[in-house]
Image (tube, rainbow, N blue to C red):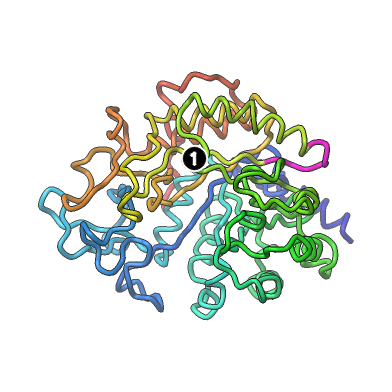
Amino acid sequence: MAKLSGIGLLLIGRLLHAAGGVDPSTLDGKVLFGYQGWFNCPGDDSPRPTWSSWSRGVPTAATLTVDMYPDLSELDPDERCEVPGMTIGGKPAYVYSAWNRKTVLRHFRWMEEYGLDGVLFQRFAGRIAERRASGDVVLKNVMAGAKESGRTFALEYDITGGNPATLAQVLRDDWAYMVDELKITSHPNYLHHNGKPVLSVWGIGLDEPNHPPEGPQAAKELIEWFQSKAPIKYQVTYMGGTPSRWATLTRDSRKDESWADVFKMMNVIQPWTIGRYRDIATVDRWKEDIVVPDLKLAAQNKQLYMPVVFPGFSWHNLRKTSPQNQIPRNRGEFLWRQAYNAKVAGAKMLKIAMFDEVNEATAMFKLAARRQDAPDQGYWLTLDADGANLPSDWYLRLAGEITRMFHGEIAADPKLPSNPGPARKPAPAR
């Protein structure tokens, strides 16, 4: 039965690819975004009619928790939430809600237009009960977006803030709900590898108090359940979102030597690198000091290795003592060099953090290009911050070129494309 299922998945993948979609039957060659989908605003019909993730309370210059402003010029009036007291050139300023299916479908159409593969959708362990009670609206929007656009997706549990005493059971129960009630792994675009659905669990092994479990044995038991101890329908190809120093058990990794065996169990290693380097020189050192030996160890362990790259970083509004534009994007040079280095080092797949996270300024979707395109009030990091005149879709265009590079459609080149893209023919509204 398992073999027939694998053949069926492969056939479906080939048919989808032939029809212009992304093959969901394999991780090979994939470039995936993290997708947060955690934005709400009053009037979006969610159980939390608040400015969730945009600000602490009503957005003002003092309460903002985002550094970048999305380009909302393509959104229809019914997708926009007016922000009281904020203006752009004297006109009302808006934000959006991921509870609006129309907007999430629009995001996935952008992925289709720019030739992108899909997303790892973030599901936070501490909010699972709340999400389920409210009908998992955003996840259902993602499922609809993937199906409409022919993109692939997989679930990624973020265990940050999870209860150590209940984490394993919460994840097991929720995954059963995903498989049995939401039929997520039966979705035609759900990502599989080696005949099994891909499931990512992010944060285990990080040496921080809010990342359970603290002991390696509990981590081993959780991974083993997902890989082989669970009933067959719940078994997965297990992707671990690990510390950046998973291979050496230093710095951000837990130090007990038994954690080496935990990391070795994972089918796919996805090390967290945000903030671990800050310019081209440190990116190049990271490649030689970390990526190359990581790839070697993963190969010895018969594991897949998915490096994580990011366009830049800034969380000044979230943490007021942090500098503005902390890790500059340098008009895409910083992102491109990371992706190029990963490819030439031998990586076969890649994660880009993130599609929509304007909070830490790692967002890749369409963004305010000039300071005058963002609200007049408050600090905003716009694409002209480093002295470049860039279109709002610049990073989607770069992501399209990175995807083509990992697909083998273009050669790896250390030079940033001067005119990435342009976008493929826009997908029609459906």
Q: Is mark 1 on a helix, strand or loop?
A: loop
Q: Please identify the quarter of the rendering in which residue 215 is found.
A: bottom right
Residue type pointed to by label 1 = Phe
Q: Does the magenta stretch include residue 301?
A: yes
Q: Nearer the viewer, residue 304 or 210?
A: 210
- Asked if residue 235 shows in the view, the reply is no
| Residue at horizontal 60 percent and vertical 48 percent from the top | 252
Determine whether 297 is above or below 57 in the image: above
Q: Which residue lies furthest to the left in this view?
A: 90
Image quadrant occupied by the N terminus: bottom right
Q: Taking the image as drawn, is residue 94 in sight?
A: yes
- 110 horizontally vs 126: left or right: left
Residue 264, placed above or below residue 279: below
Relative image position of residue 126 (x, y in whole percent): 55, 71
Residue at 48% x, 66% y is 138
Residue at which label 1 appears: 310
Position of 209 with respect to 61 (left or right) is: right
Q: Residues within 10 Å of mark 1 (few under 14, many from 20)?
A: many
Q: Residue 12 at x, y = what percent? A: 72, 51
Magenta stretch in the rendered image: 299-305
* Horizontal side of residue 367 vs 27, given as left or right: left
On the image, the x and y values in percent for residue 159 come to 60, 63
Q: Which of the two residues, 145 or 294, is positioned nearer the viewer here?
A: 294
Which residue, as the protein is rendered here, is positioned at the far bottom?
133
Residue 286 drawn in magenta:
no
Which residue sits at x=32%, y=43%? 323
